[in-house]
Image (spheres, grey):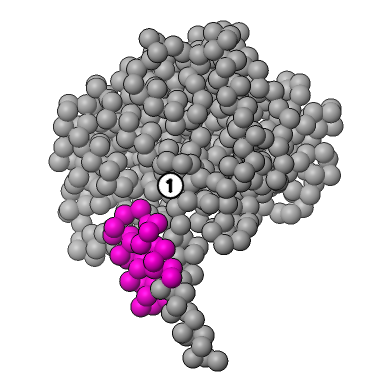
Amino acid sequence: MLGWILVATHLVGVVSAVRAVFETRTSQGSIAWALSLVFVPYIALPSYWLLGQSRFDGYKFLRRRRRPVPRADTSGVRKRARDLGFSVGPEQKDRRLALLERLASMPFTSRNHVELLVNGPATFERIFAAIAEAEHYVLVEFYTLSDDSLGRRLAEELAARAAAGLRVHVLFDEVGSYDLPKAFVEGLRKRGVLAQSFESSRGRGPAARLNFRNHRKLVVVDGRIAFVGGHNASELYLGEADEFPHWRDTHVAVHGPAALGAQVAFAEDWLWARGEGLDLAWQPTPADDGDMTALVVPSGPADIVETATLMLLEVIHSAQRRLWIASPYFVPESEILLALQLAALHGVDVRILMPEHSDERFVHLASYSYLTDLDRVGIRLYRYLPGMMHQKVILVDDALASVGSLNMDNRSLRLNFEMTTWVHDTKFAAEVEAMLLADFERSRLSKTEEYTGRSFWFRLGVRFVRLFAPIL
């Protein structure tokens, strides 16, 4: 019996190796998986079937099979936006905006007002105010939902709206919210809130992937306003935790037609998690004081193409004067790193902002290995000093900026469901510029010597950790 088990394990290893050769994105990855699956299948097989996939097949197949539920509405949104004069015409947008539209399957729209929300207190007070003013429904989705002071206040606000007769839907990631008590979720349900974990590991075969995460942080109210950014529903993001008493993060409140992009993403996530569609409002509603052009771009492992990677490559290559990136986890793959170097060689002011003290030690350690690559072409890497810097912000030239949940690492680019709000507006870009300049003032410039001048064992550890960058 033991002999048959060993033979079967090796046969499954060979079959999995063939699959890896066909599906792994890079040749190096294909070789690594194939060799390990053939020669050490006892170790490699569990790792491959849990961590080796970059496509969320179950979600993708459900999206195709049940496409009429939420996706058909996107074409209606595009048509209504054009009919109402909210779509941005070709004469008003450059090439990169057109590409972002194709990736999002939604148009850039005008008549939006996008409010920059700096740090947790400002973000959640605005979220709670919007929830209190909701008239029909509230959609909430967080990677981390905690049973702490902030999580309980959010629960109270949502339960109050449910008691008032509104439809309230809550999604959370089961990995990001691993310590959320069942009693917390049941308490929401008993008070009329439909609360559900995303369940990325649900399903059989290729669908059962513990490696995928729903990393989105969003709140949508009545299809009129969407909150998107880096904050989770945890008091940690208010700067009230002992480990990180100062937590630097950024969110945006999107008032206007662009909010529907976030709503489409939630509807698809809810379809996967619950197997049911949602009756939502899809009429684009302009903001009262809206004069900004904006687009919400969802991305994830069920996309036809690598949305997040293509999006980043396009904006990096299109930068002409300035490219400032704030990312808490800077572990870029080769194509992103080369694009950044090329931009710097073209004379673009490229700056990277990351934390001095990180909540992810291995990712932080791996970041030292990039110092030489950045420094030799004049890219400046700043380390934020006061505390944890968790914002995900990009500023391109003088009119294009983004705020979202997308980190500069392989997990965000290929394995996580993410969301990014792009705003094409000089006034908003100026606000982002002022915010980042203040952050740079609280940071120090990191130099190559911090890596090359350290001990052999430190440099060996850095290079070793970098080998695991695709799964960090």
Residue at point 44% right, 53% down? 54
Quadrant for residue 66, please give it: top right
Quadrant for residue 17, please give it: bottom left
The magenta stretch spans residue 27? yes
Q: Amino acid at mark 1?
A: Arg
Mark 1 residue crowding within 10 angstroms, few (<14) / some (14–19) / many (20+): many
Is 75 positioned to the left or the right of 451 in the image?
Answer: right
Highlighted magenta segment, given as a residue range:
15-43
Q: Which of the two residues, 148 or 221, is positioned nearer the viewer here? A: 221
In this rendering, is residue 329 above or below 248? below
Q: Main secondary structure of the magenta part?
A: helix
Residue 212, percent across and down?
Answer: 52, 52
Q: Which residue is mark 1?
A: 414
Q: Which of the two residues, 35 or 289, is positioned nearer the viewer here? A: 35
Residue at point 79% right, 28% down? 166
Quadrant for residue 341, please give it: top left
The quarter of the image holding the C terminus is bottom left
Residue at point 50% right, 9% down? 291
